[in-house]
Amino acid sequence: MRRRKSSSTHRIARLHKTAGLEKATVISQWYQSLLQHNPDGILVLNKTGNVLASNPAAEQILSYTKQEINKCANFTEIIPHEDLEKASYYFREALGGEPHAFDMKMRHKDGYSIDVSTKLVPMFVSGRVAGVFGIFKNISEQIKADLELRKAQELIESFVNHSSDSIVVSGLQGEIIRTNDAFRNLFPVEQGGYVGRNLQELPNYLNRSTLEHIMINICNGKHRFNMEINHVRAGGEPVVLDMQTSPISDGEGNVSAYSGVFRDITAYKDMEHLLREGQQQYKLIAENMTDLICLLDEKHTIQFMSPSSSQILGYPPEAMLGTKAEEWVEESERKKLEVLSNKNHMSTTLELNYIRPDGTQIVLECHSVPVNDEVQGKVYLSVVSRDITKRKHAELALAEAEAKYRVLVEEAMVGVYLCQDDHFLYINPRFCEFLNYTSEELKQHPVEHFIVPEDLALFRENLRIGLSGERKSVSYVYRLYRKDGSIAELEGNGSFTMFNGRPAIIGTIMDVTERNKTEEMLRKSDRLSVVGQLAAGVAHEIRNPLTSLKGFVHLLKSRSHEFRDYLDIMSSELDRINYIVSEFMLVAKPQGSIQYLRNHAVDIMDQVISLLSSQAALYNVQFIIATTTDELYVMCDENQMKQVYINILKNAVESMPRGGIVRIDFSKRPEDKIRIRIVDQGEGIPEERMPQLGEPFYTTKEKGTGLGLMVCYKIIESHGGRLRIHSVVSEGTTVDIELPLTP
């Protein structure tokens, strides 16, 4: 008996175990089905945040494959930085056993962020939290739609608030839901607000019978109901209002509210009343007017035509009465007549092309006004037409002339401007090119913003002269800043005029920067030529007696030792005079003695540096050469180029008494040019002295002659090149030499 009982117990245990396994299998299958087919993205996370599993929806939302998601060391790798702290906080809360729902961003595989609605649910195993289910869905489109909805609501709200018409929205029982300022001004209340109050409680609002009449019409299928009402404003002013009432439906098409729009049409009604009262006077005037007056019924049948039709249209009035207006115009123009009979009964203006019986074509300007016949209950159109053919031809000619003048101004080689109140109103493209600004950039700043400070006083004085009426126009030369900070010299003429009732200046302007530079170069060249001629004569006249003096000094030094110190001083000064005469001779040296040969620019510089290296060492100065791999050959006189290099390098060395580096850079430039740039770290040259550089006998050195740099300018110019100097005090000087490149 005991064995049977034991055997039976074991069978029951096995059955329970088998049933448990089957149940666990079913639950596992349910779990897998839920994971695989859930439309929301699901990430299974362990307690450290590592991704254990994901479902296809998660992979689709983030565009990652299952393998890519499972490779993530932690779920925070797919969370943008700005939401990382929030996601980590709710993850810790879920590990504590509390589920949390919140919105955040997740990183898409393509790098951009998407908005997701997320829920973190703790995953319990044997009563303990073993991990977290991260359930999320993409709400980016929903957020975008909500944002667009808010924008639309804001636009509607702005329209209602700022509308000149009085607007009210009420419920089905007349309770006020929404009003705008215009409505509150039209129907003011002494105490309390409007929302929740019934329309019938408002002073001077529509009476009950009128409201019932409106509701009956709307309920009978009229989606919009119009009527005119007489109203007295709070100040006692009587007005006529055009009221339009419309039902408002909810999403299911059921009427949930009504809107009322009130417009003050008092002036229109007064005009209409005056028209009725003066019908006879109107007819008398109409029959004697040169303009064409026509009265049409709702079907455009001509009821009245003024006698001027014979002169304007070429047909007498009696020939047109009883016919339709469309019969008298070309088929292509008939659609325009449809505008006259607009359902809103508003006045309309249009232009109509008409062909007379003799074939001539005219243009008519037609202005229609609806006229209500309250006796017969009809609406007529009073159409006043005027022959504007000559005016149209004049407008066309004016437009053509304006186009021509605009092309002339826009394509002009000079800058054209119009300024008022210290701001540009118009600038043509050429003006913009002078300063490298766009038209919009120039208009954003005052005119004085672009003028260099030194020229502001002249600008203000010219402005005062023009505005005071002393002169109608002024000529000037101003310096203006370009967009890159450089300065342009502009020469122009400004005329003072009136524009839109206020003083303005219109004028033209030319960029004379390059012209002034050319003139300065010509003046400098003339000075060099004069100095050359002077040098030739002076050097010749001085050198002969100089030779005798030097000879006698040497003779005295050899025979007498008593005055040897004085003789040494005399000899030194005679050597200096000889050096200056040599400089003169170089300036006056005839061009025929120059030998232009193909030389490598860097090789000549290397030879000069070898000569000057000892002198540079005394000043603790180093020469550094930087060059390209290009073959930098120039056609030049080697000795003259050496003279240029020596003069410039000596100046650089002597400008650095405390030592430093002289950088020499060789580079190939556009248009087959070579540039030799020499940069020192010397004391620099003040800006006010820069224009005098290169002039004869002008020097910044204590013992200089002022001829060395002049000779350099002349040599480079004779080689078809250009020498430019830029210097900043306490920073150094940069010398750029440009020469034609030789193949």
Image: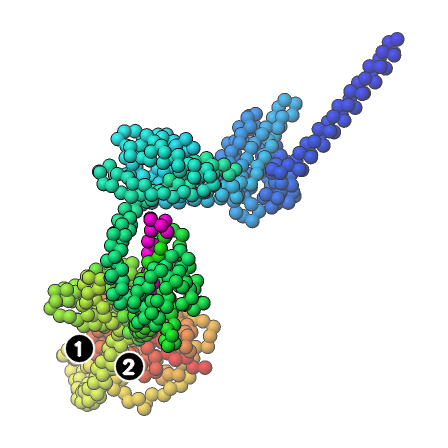
Q: Quadrant of residue 295?
A: bottom left
Give the Cα distance between marks 2 and 1: 33 Å
Q: Is residue 369 magenta?
A: yes
701 horizontally vs 139: left or right: left
| Rendered residue at 80%/20% (across/down) | 15
Q: Is residue 552 above or below residue 40?
A: below
Q: Is residue 227 above or below residue 90?
A: below
In the rendering, at what x and y percent does residue 377 appear? 36, 49
Residue 104: in sight, yes or no?
no
Identify residue type, mark 2. Lys
Residue 159 or residue 456, whichever sits in front: 159
- Which tag is nearer the camera, tag 2 or tag 1? 2
Mark closer to the chain start, 2 or 1:
1
Q: Residues within 10 Å of mark 2 (few under 14, many from 20)?
A: many
| Rendered residue at 27%/60% (across/down) | 283
| Rendered residue at 19%/86% (across/down) | 534
Q: Is residue 155 above or below residue 207?
A: below
Tag shown at residue 171: none
Q: Which residue is mark 1?
A: 569
Element marked by disc 2: helix
In the rendering, at what x and y percent does residue 539 appear? 21, 87
Q: Which residue is mark 2?
A: 714
Residue 733 or residue 318, whichever sits in front: 318
Residue 353: in sight, yes or no?
yes
In the rendering, at what x and y percent does residue 144 appear? 49, 44
In the rendering, at what x and y percent does residue 304 appear? 33, 61
Residue 231 or residue 390, whichever sits in front: 231
